[in-house]
Amino acid sequence: MASIDFGMLVHTKPAAVFNPTSTQDIVSLIKLSYNSSFPFKIAARGRGHSCRGQAMVENGIVIDMTSLSKNSYNHINDKNRGNCGIRVSYDPCLGFYVDVCGGLLWIDLLHATLEHGLAPISWTDYLYLTVGGTLSNAGISGQAFRHGPQITNVYELDVVTGKGELVTCSKTINSELFNAVLGGLGQFGIITRARIRLEAAPKRVKWVRMLYDDFSSFARDQEHLISLYGDYNNELLSHVEGLDYVEGSIMHQVSPNNWRSSFFTPKDQAKITSLNTSNGIIYCLEVVKYYYDYNLSTHTDVDKELEGQLQGLNFIPEFIFTKDVPFVEFLNRVRTGELELQSKGLWDVPHPWLNIFIPRSRINDFSHVFTKIASKDSKVLGPILIYPLNRNKWDDNMSAMIPDEEVFYTVGLLHSSGFDDWKELEDKNKELLSYCDEHGIMIKQYLPHYNTLEEWKSHFGKKWRIFKEMKALFDPKMILSPGQKVFNHL
């Protein structure tokens, strides 16, 4: 399995797979390579959810990080024993937090923290990913407009650098490594422990979807909803007020449900397919409001607050759909679709995905590209996500790259295909990227993949110099994460 990933587009055979039972095992392996006359390459792999070989290594060693969590004890940061599990704690300055093994899945972290009535506040759409894996990229979903990506909700890390040194780091201790590793694509070290912010866990959610036939209205309403949370230093709403999730998508009228969630009932689907649209495309604005107890007055209050939040939005009249579900069911919504596709043999197939960030000022210029890609006569098998984020919920000191504008959109083309026709979808991705380049749309790739040094320099822009310096400082022999192909050209 270490020779393929979720994308199934790249096949790279390692020399071996290493299953660590402790952090010290990882330290020893990297030191062995670092002290060797001919250092061997090492790639840390969680669930292998990348699409283009980022967690692979040719003729090197793949570390199965999930083995670390399977063999962990209920210890955190015990450097003598070198194991880590899950521990919830409280600090008067930080509030509640959890120390967790980097190889643990977010779904397991969710269930463990819920036992304490707590939960992390920033998520990804899919929870069967490792903590260290998402923190090496950013970790985004519909909560990020309010709470930022997962990387900005981390207080402290244990990292094994490319020299084989186990280092504890935070914003105040070894901050260079802390900032470099978060969003750093695994280039500087392997995350073996993360200290993550927790808040009180909701019990249930009000889950609403509204449909649009006009892209401009769809985008404008999303921007309005996230604008309430734009001031980082002066929150307009407390943590129990306002919307908790905003995410937009483009869906096919003939099949409103997809593997991300089976939200619409058969009756809803019949209503949606009756809409008269010119190209079979509908824009879906999805919002969620958490609530914290079950009593009737809470239901009424939440309904009233939602009504106020959504007042004045320009969705198609009468095409608003609401569900009330448990918090865990909402967060784990993709799992149902995954299991269904697995049962049909449609999950382990090629996924030529493309994820990009687009400046708000150019999103309308870009909108006709969506129409072309998602039109009913176009071969697209998979969801298309598009929703805005607030830049000031991110930390520019970290390695993750985003556009310079205060509001930017994330766009995810989550294609699936057969084994003999994925290149057609990959060509569509290249066409889209070429369009952006030709029209001066300054995008940033999320989960980036480039083939040349110049492309990487352009991606990191003004951060390239410090990114390169951090590589020389923490992984001078370029041992770690060669599958990202950032420094392979040097």
Image (tube, rainbow, N blue to C red):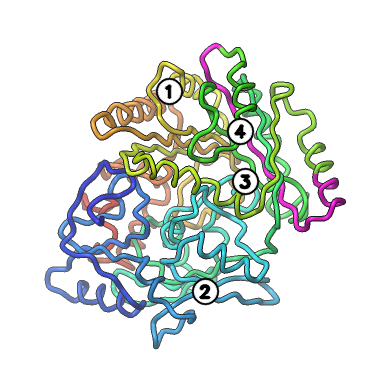
- Residue at 69% across, 25% down: 319
Please provide percent x and percent y for residue 385. Answer: 51, 35
* The N terminus sits in image quarter: bottom left
Which of disc 3 and disc 4 is earlier in sequence?
3
| Pointer 2 local density, CA inside 10 Å: few below 14, some 14–19, many at least 20 | many
Q: Dot 1: what SS?
A: helix
- Residue at 63% across, 53% down: 147
Q: Residue tagged by mark 3?
A: 145
Kindly report the distance in space between the C-alpha atoms of the residues bearing marks 4 and 3. Answer: 25 Å
> How many numbered tags mark residues here?
4
Q: Residue tagged by mark 2?
A: 86
Q: Dot 3: what SS?
A: helix
Q: Is the residue under label 1 in contact with that under label 3 (CB below 8 Å)?
A: no
The answer to which of 231 and 82 lies nearer the viewer is 82
Please provide percent x and percent y for residue 306. Answer: 78, 40
Please provide percent x and percent y for residue 237. Answer: 77, 51
Q: Nearer the viewer, mark 1 or mark 4?
A: 4
Kindly report the distance in space between the C-alpha atoms of the residues bearing marks 2 and 3. Answer: 27 Å
Q: Dot 2: what SS?
A: strand
Which of disc 1 and disc 2 is earlier in sequence?
2
Q: Is the residue under label 1 in contact with that under label 2 (CB below 8 Å)?
A: no
Q: Which residues are magenta?
A: 278-302
Relative to 299, is 172 above or below? below
Q: Residue tagged by mark 1?
A: 373
